[in-house]
Amino acid sequence: MKGVILYGNQSSTHPEGLFIFKKKLGKAGREMNDEEVAVKIAEYGKEIGSLKHRTTDLEEQQKNIQELAMSVKELALNMKTMMEEQGKQGDRLQKLENEPAERWNSAKKTAFTTIVSVISGAVATGLIFMAAQYL
């Protein structure tokens, strides 16, 4: 088992497997006593516990964000489908709205053709009778 040497915020592995903690005080460094080492280890333990808690919270937040992203994606797909369906319904509605106008135009055309045919027939018949009188 290898130990760790700590100098301020830096650490390195000790080849003999001993745990040696050193802290620089001012410009000159000094070796820490057992009580100071125990205090530092307790501080590091608290900090590690806090970091684990924060990591757990971040993992939960990441999970929630991922679920939200999937929900937004699903919502976008549903909206796309709804827009396509709305477009199709708009086309069908336009056809339904145009149908009475087309019927009216067809009826006007038929009535006009009938009136013109009746008048033309009457004029032709009158001309034939007039021509028959002179013959």
Image (tube, grey):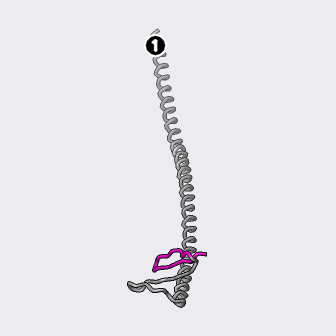
Check the image and report above or below for 130 versus 79: above
Image-based side of 124 in relation to 70, left or right: left
- In the rendering, at what x and y percent does residue 2 appear? 58, 75
- In the rendering, at what x and y percent does residue 128 appear? 48, 15
Residue at 54% across, 49% down? 84
Residue at 53% across, 43% down? 95
- Choose between 79 and 106: the one closer to the eye: 79
Which SS type dominates the magenta stretch?
strand
Disc 1 crowd rating (10 Å Cα; few below 14, some 14-19, many 20+) is few
Check the image and report above or below for 42 versus 65: below
Residue 85 among magenta residues: no
Residue at 55% across, 68% down? 62
- In the rendering, at what x and y percent does residue 114 appear? 51, 29
Give the residues in magenta: 1-15
- Choose between 110 and 77: the one closer to the eye: 77
SS assignment at label 1: helix
Image-based side of 120 in relation to 55, left or right: left
- Choose between 94 and 110: the one closer to the eye: 94
- The amino acid type of the residue labelled 1 equals Ala
For disc 1, the marked residue is 131
Residue that sits furthest to the bottom in the current view: 35
Residue at 54% across, 61% down? 72
